[in-house]
Image (cartoon, helix red, strand yellow):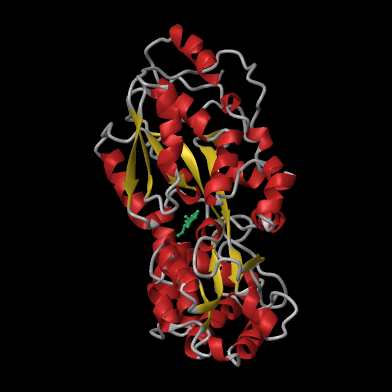
Amino acid sequence: MVTIRALRRSAGLVAAALVLTACGSSGGSDSGEQAGDPSFEGRGPITFVAGKDTTGTVQAALDRWNRLHPKEQVSFIQLPTDADSQRREMIQNAETKSDAYTVLSLDVVWTSEFAAHRWIEKLPENQFPLRKMLKPVVETAEYRGALYAVPFSSDGGLLYYRADLLKKAGIAGPPTTWSRMKADCAKVKRLPEAKDMSCYAGQFRKYEGLTVNFSEAVQSAGGVVTDAGGKPDVDTPEAKKGLDFLVGSFKDGTIPKEALTYQEEGSRRAFQSGKLIFLRNWPYVYSLARKSNVAGKFAVAPLPGLNGPGSSSLGGHNLALSSFARNKATAMDFMKFFTSQDSARTFLKDAAFAPSYAALYDDASLTKEYPYLRVLKQSIETAVPRPRVVRYGEVTSAIQQQAYAALTGVKSSEQALRTLQQDLRR
Ligand code: GLC
């Protein structure tokens, strides 16, 4: 249906692909009635560029599109798993103005940078059902009040835990504070089968995941990395308490040293192989862990914090259209298809991707299969976005440097936070 409408629209196309003036202010309209819809031209093969598909579900979704669009095939270009390498490759492609990449799966933290450099097209808001999506998720796709990408999947940090072992150790439910989590680990580790397990891990290698884990620790202790006005405010006692939790946990063995090498996948594998009692990770892990050794043995809870529940960094991916691509009309249709509510439902069912559509979190058949969906919705709605800045690459690199220096004992928490505050201000 979308395709036929789009085809009709494209029939009257004029050349300029950049005539995108209809974007109003932020918030999104799903009326589809706005006069003078901007359109993109060109139909034919396109590419979809994203990080390596660790869930093994993306190609099947692309195949569904390809079966319906034999003359507008999409091929999948998989980049490395870590966000920083993906960003670098996408920027390289943009800087050479290459048309090799059409639709980009952009990490939510890159929108400003890519939009400001005009590496991605401004998109007509009235072409996407943004009102049905979670507001904070839509905001990650905007830059200066205009839409530059379409929410594909969201992400909120979750605490995976070994419910079987907690139960066996006589613990009633998952911890909501860090100190409870440590106390629970002490009890669990008295069980013979758990004596060699480590308590907790997240992602602590020097890459984007460290920025996420550091920010979550700071927020979960009542601090901020940047304040509401976007100014850095990380040299505070609260931020120190957050960083100290991580530093202290490495020192006392709560977090195993190995976790300094963990990205999402390494930490997932450690949890699945029974090395960890608690794991901070994203929703996708649910779909894989339930097919693993720990199937039926784990559950999911909100992240813990210093004095009560913690707070997540807002993660996720949006689809953006490369400014240098060909076949932009096809790309627009593909983006509509891939970000539709049906597609989000399939990705939730098959890969446990957090949907951007509000309704899916309250759908009874889905909450039955994914009992933590309400927890996740709350985690996303209250999640804190990482700094929305054009020079995000420099911001995240500064955070990674200083957080890693503190975790490895090269600097004290205080020194690291002071330097970070100076670096961010600059
Ligand atoms: C996930 C999140 C993304 C984040 C990355 C960090 O892919 O969706 O937002 O930057 O993890 O490793």
Q: Residue at x 37, y 51 (%)?
A: 52
Numbered disc total: 0
**119 or 89, which is in the foreground?**
89
**Residue 422 visible in image:** no
Quadrant assignment, res 160: bottom right
Placement of the N terminus among the 4 image quadrants: top right
Q: Can I make out residue 412 in this image?
A: yes
- From the viewer's perspective, is 271 left or right of 323? right
Q: Image quarter for residue 386?
A: bottom right
> Horizontal and vertical percent for residue 92?
27, 45
Q: Is residue 423 above or below residue 345?
A: below
Residue 351 x/y as whole percent:
52, 50
Which residue shows up at 50% across the image and 72% down it?
271
Please state if 33 lies on the left or on the right of 202 as rendered.
right
Compared to residue 128, the image places residue 143 above or below, namely below
Give residue 346's position: percent from left, percent from top: 56, 41
Q: Residue at 61% x, 43% y: name it.
A: 356
Residue lying furthest top: 12
In the image, residue 30 sits, relative to residue 378, either above or below, namely above
Q: In this rendering, would 183 be left or right of 141?
A: right
Front-lying residue, 82 or 350:
350
Give x and y (percent) for residue 218: 58, 71
The C terminus lies in quadrant? bottom left
Foreground residue among 57 and 208: 57
